[in-house]
Image (spheres, rainbow, N blue to C red):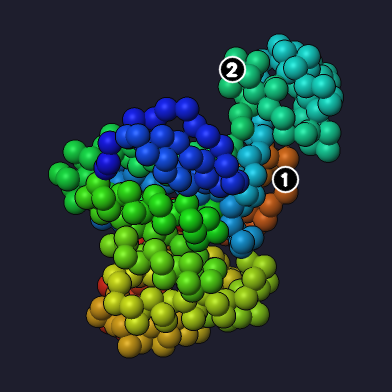
Amino acid sequence: MREAHLQSPVFCDEGSFETFINGKIEAMTSGMIFDIKRFSIHDGPGIRSTVFFKGCPLRCAWCHNPESQSFQPELIFRPERCLACGDCLEACHHGAPQLTGGKIHQDWSLCQLEGACVGVCMPGARDMIGREVQAEEVVAETLRDRVFYEESGGGVTFSGGEPLSQPDFLEECLRLCKEAGLHTALDTCGSGPWEDLKRQLPFLDLVLYDLKTLDDDLHRQATGVSNQEILKNFLNLVESGIKIRVRRPVIPAVNDQESEIDRLGAFLGPLNGKIGIDLLPYHALSADKYLRLGREGDVGKWEIPSEAVLARISAQLTEMGFKVNLRGGS
């Protein structure tokens, strides 16, 4: 990574700022993330750092990271940590935190997301999810674990949310990672203009591509958007020659039927033996997140896929010539 001596930031257009670097003015691209997970082993080869971008164009009914959906910072309230000290009542000028029956409750209709309550909450019951950072900051943080990448064949994965929704920021992060000699991966739902995806390819080693269902009507019902652009982008990726792994969430009564798996296998048919498929079993561990964000969600309404169903899907795809990996948790 290039050395940078930062002096006197000069703010300019939204999404970037200019600063003196080694005596020159360079544009630095910023973006919104909500987490960087270190020592990840499920988001590509080896030990990795996974950078979670904030914001997604899809609204998957089973989404286990609802905090990733909005493009703006959000307040999360964890009542199990609250000591009812009352400091948040004084800090908030809008009356969103309220004391009832000796417990603090949150009136989300009054919350203005200013975050004053977060700074005074010593037990950590309140937090703001989402922060704006520069690409250089992100890469500098991931470089702390370079030794683990080198020993394990790992690297950095950009996930979300949907990274393609912040294409300039993503491209800058990827470019800096490659300058630093890191292995890079993109975990994407594939929703976005092909040109935004294409420009990332020179800096990518691997694409983890979600294919939730091949049925467009079902895809619209489950995610809120059509899958036509997603499928076209996938075919363009195949033609580009970049390494791809398909990721398939397994959602009971949505896309776990034999006919759905047969349809996936037929779509990927020309790639059998050349592409791996990760099965991501549905879980309901994130149901409480929706409540903590002041929202309702459908997570928890489906059954957890049984071992028998997962074995059947794995066998179906294996018989078609695909190498299948079963991951615990989606």
Q: Earlier in the sequence, mark 2 or mark 1?
A: 2
Q: Is residue 319 visible?
A: no
Q: Secondary structure at mark 1?
A: loop
Q: Is residue 197 left or right of residue 255?
A: left
Q: How many marks?
A: 2
Q: Is residue 153 visible?
A: yes
Q: Would you place residue 272 above or below residue 30 in this image?
A: below
Q: CA distance from mark 2 to mark 1?
A: 23 Å
**Residue type at the position of mark 1:** Arg
Q: Residues within 10 Å of mark 1 (few under 14, many from 20)?
A: few
Q: Which residue is mark 2?
A: 123
Percent x, y of residue 176: 33, 49
Residue extending farthest front? 23
Dividing the picture into quarters, in which one does residue 67 lie? Answer: top right
Q: At 84% from the left edge and 24% from the top edge, which residue is drawn? A: 95
- The residue nearer to you, when weighing 3 against 141, is 3
Residue beneath disc 1: 295
Whether 132 is drawn above or below 159: the answer is above
**Res. 96 image quadrant:** top right
Residue type of the residue flagged with mark 2: Pro
Residue at the image position 69 percent from the left and 52 percent from the top: 297
- Place of residue 116 in the rendered image (x, y in percent of width and height, measured from the top left): 70, 22
Label 2 crowd (10 A; few <14 / some 14-19 / many >=20): few
